[in-house]
Structures are given as structure tokens and as C-alpha cells.
Image (tube, coloured by chain):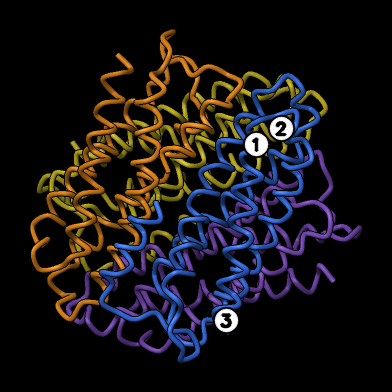
Chain colours: A orange, B yellow, C purple, D blue
Amino acid sequence: MNDLISSMQATHPREFTVGGSAVDPAALAECLAACVECAQTCTTCADACLSEDMVADLVGCIRLNATCADICAATASVLSRRPEGDAAYLRSLLEACRDVCERCAQECGSHAEMHEHCKVCAEACRRCAKACADLLSALG
Amino acid sequence: MNDLISSMQATHPREFTVGGSAVDPAALAECLAACVECAQTCTTCADACLSEDMVADLVGCIRLNATCADICAATASVLSRRPEGDAAYLRSLLEACRDVCERCAQECGSHAEMHEHCKVCAEACRRCAKACADLLSALG
Amino acid sequence: MNDLISSMQATHPREFTVGGSAVDPAALAECLAACVECAQTCTTCADACLSEDMVADLVGCIRLNATCADICAATASVLSRRPEGDAAYLRSLLEACRDVCERCAQECGSHAEMHEHCKVCAEACRRCAKACADLLSALG
Amino acid sequence: MNDLISSMQATHPREFTVGGSAVDPAALAECLAACVECAQTCTTCADACLSEDMVADLVGCIRLNATCADICAATASVLSRRPEGDAAYLRSLLEACRDVCERCAQECGSHAEMHEHCKVCAEACRRCAKACADLLSALG
């Protein structure tokens, strides 16, 4: 996924700048790939949780999975369009994405030993939280 | 739309609280309705702009419309799920939504006299920016 | 919602034709409004079901609600962009939307007496299934 | 991406059957990965096209890219939830996805020599069209 995203980003005819500074291509590609993977993983984890016998204990996880997927998917789409100007909304969106991924990583992580899907999902969420934090730093 | 949303919200068996305080039902319903309408209007405006002869002058508007639609749609879905706890990510998401709607209202507003679709869209964006700001205030 | 959608559609500078024939504006506006409302209602119903004590009996409904919301949202976005040519994919998408709405209406309808949110949701699904079927007929 | 998707699918506690027959895990994982990549690639291609000097010649491509992204994203989410029963809507959705990917591959392919992003995007669309066709065959 990173390879395809990197090569696609390299073909873009317009530079991606925020507040006048160029956005680091590696941080961008990693954040895009992490958001896309996290969205897909969370949607699957929500349905896997919904399929467990103990679903009543997993409702908070299912809800958070679905919300994390929505925010990650929106973040990936917005980043793909290379927002222009100071893009204050991009920072807020990345903060929302980082925070919901941290929450979801915590929630899924808390029952990772019981459910393999939550373990895999917690890792995807952690990777995405870090990628959003790194891109936020890179934006200056 | 507000009527359906209000009646649907009234049937929800779980109270919507953020940081221990109940979320105002009227502010919630207005924000949901405004996000849904703004997403739909922005998607249409993007395609209407794309269909204008002077499309080369509207690329910034098309880009912003698509991004505004994505953020509004995600905000509506996340709000519909009544996030739990302190929901820090909800505040950041509402800030992102308010800010992108303001930007899009400004952009569409700047050529509202030439394009009726931009005029209608600027109004939907202004309503949504206000609804997000009001819900943020209501969250305390 | 219908009013905003109709007035927005009326501002579009490009005619919407499929296979050479103009798409009926009233059928289009009704389908757009129904898809947008059904997506929003289904997302809320999924979370309301998830919040019920008897969640274990509602997992099929929650899954179908989420899927119905995804397909309705995609259908609304695709219709808003006025696909060109013979648009065979538009017919298949409308068939998918009609069919998933019928299934969801049936599922929600089967426990409408126990859960008011399922009752409201079943109505939104029925309206959307009919609007998709009518637009399919109108496309010829 | 395929690795993460395959390992995530392997953790799912419920078998994916359509019309009583198990869905082939390899065909499912390939279709999921192809849809996710195609959605991401098309969203980027739309913005890259929008950034070209000759944008006026690319409006049909931009429109199709955005629509292809919406349908691919919905298909990935719906597949991730393992629809139950005969899932007639799943077949129609896969047909819509296959057809829009073929159209988009054709459109992007027709100016692949001028725009590298269209070349990469056409390949992603072709892969996704084939993956949807293969999964449809596998569903019987």
C-alpha cells in the first residue's frame, strides 16, 4: 500500500504546502497508508466484535471502531486532496484522527488477548495515531 | 430533515453525555441536520462547478467542496453514534468541520453572484459552521 | 431536505441524461432526499440497537443498518454527480440500494413494535427502496 | 495491504457464506485490497487531474474518479461486514463496482501517456474490476 501511495503522490502535479512550507512526502505517504489501513481494519473489527458471543461486552468497542473508521477514511480523503492555504481544519482533523486512534487502540488493546481481531486492530490504530502525530509535527 | 432527525434522536435508548454533562438535544439535532445537508449540497456544488465553462477558475472551490463534504459526512456519522467519555476527538472534529465550512462558505460566497449553486452552497456551509460552533459551546 | 435538494439540482448547469434521455427531476430529487435521510437514519438506528439491553438479538439488524447506510450514502453521492453515458453502473447501484433498503426495512420492521427507532428506520428504508425503484423505472 | 487484510479476515469469528456456500478467502481478500487501493488512488487522481493546466479536458475523468472512489469504498465496507443470506444487493454492488472500475480504467487509460497519475490509476481500476468479477464468479 505504501508503495502505491508513494508512487501516486509522486505523480501529483501540484506541490503540497501548508502555511507556505512543503509537506514532507514520506510523512504524508505514511499517514495516508496508515489511515486507509486503519479504516479498513476498524470496519472489519467492528463486525468481528459484533459476531462474538460476548457482544454485549463489546458494544463500546464496536461503536469506537465504527467512529475511528469514519474519521480515518475522511482524513485519508482530505489529505489526498492536498489542502491549500493555512488549512487550519487539516490540523484539527489530524488531531481528531490521532485522538480517536489512541482511544481505539486502548479499547481494542484492553481485550487483545481474548480477541485476535482486536489485537491486529489495536496495532493498526497505534500506527495511525503515530502517523497523524508525526505529520502534525512535520506541518510545523 | 430536522423533524426526522429529532424524532430519531428522541428514540435513542442511551443518553448523550460528554464529560458528564448531557448534550442539548436541539443543538445536536440542528448540527446533525446541518452536516447532512451541507455534505449533500457540497457534493452537488462540486459537480456543478465542474460543469461550468470556466472550470479552470473554480478548481479551488471544487477541491474545498469535496473536502467539506467528507468532513461534514464524517461529523454527522460520529455524532449519530453519541461518543462516550470526554470525547476529545469529537471537539477536534467539530472544530475541523466548523473551520472547513467557514472556508467553503467564503470561497463559494466569493462567486455566489455568478453561480447560483455556489450561492445556495455558501448558505448551507454558513448554517453548518454556525451549528458546529453552537454545539461546541453547548458541550462546554 | 427535498426543497434544498430540488433547488440545488435546479441550479446545475449540465442536464442529467442517461442513455440519451433526460432524468426526471422530481424522481431524482426524491431519490437523493430519500438516500440521504435513510443513510442518516440507519447510522442512528445501528447505534440505538447497539445501546439496547438485548443487543445480542439485534446483531443482524446492526450489521444491515451499517451496510444500508454505506450504500445509501454512496448512491446519493453518485447521483449528485449526474453520471454520463449509458451509466450501467448507476442502474446496478440503484438496484443494490433498493434491495438493501428492502431487506433493512424487513429486518427493522420485524421488531418495530419493541423499538421505536427500528419503526422510524423501517419507514425511511421503505421510502428509499421505493424512490430507487421509481428512479430505475424513470431511467427506462 | 493484502497481508493485513488476509490476517484480519482470518481472525473473523463468523464464516462468510452467500446462498449457503462459503466465500473463497483469497478472492475476498483480493477484492477488499483492490477496492481499498482503488478508492484511495481514484481520490488522488481526481485531485491531480484538477491540478493540471488542461483541467477543462479532464472534467469527465475527475467526475468518474470521484464516483469510482465512492463505489469502491462502499464495496470494501460492505464486504468487510460479511453480508448474510442470499445477499442479492451484494451481487448488484459488486457489478456496479466492476462496471465503474472498467469505465474509469478506460477513461484514465485514454490519457495515460500524458498523465502518469492516470496511468497508475488505470492500473488500480483494472485490478479492482478483475477482483470484483472474480469474486462474483466465486459467489456462484
Amino acid residing under circle 1: Ala
Residue hosting label 1: B46
**Please, what secondary structure does the residue beneath circle 2 have?**
helix
Considering depth in this image, is D76 or B72 the residue closer to the camera?
D76
Q: Amino acid at mark 2?
A: Cys
Residue D95 at x, y = what percent? 65, 69
Q: Is residue A124 visible to us here?
A: yes
In the figure, A91 relative to A101: above or below? above
Task: Examine the rendered structure and indicate whether residue A23 appears above or below residue B13.
Answer: above
User: What chain letter is assigned to the residue under label 3?
Assistant: D
How many marks on residues? 3
Chain of the residue under label 2: B
Q: Position of residue C69 (x, y in %)?
A: 47, 64
Secondary structure under tag 1 reads helix
Give the quarter of the image for residue D110: top right
Mark 1 to mark 2 CA distance (whole Å): 5 Å
On the image, numbered disc 3 is attached to which residue?
Answer: D88
The chain ID associated with circle 1 is B
Residue under the image location 48 percent in, 24 percent down: A83
Label 2 belongs to which residue? B49
* Amino acid type, callout 3: Ala
Distance from the alpha carbon under mark 3 to that under mark 2: 36 Å
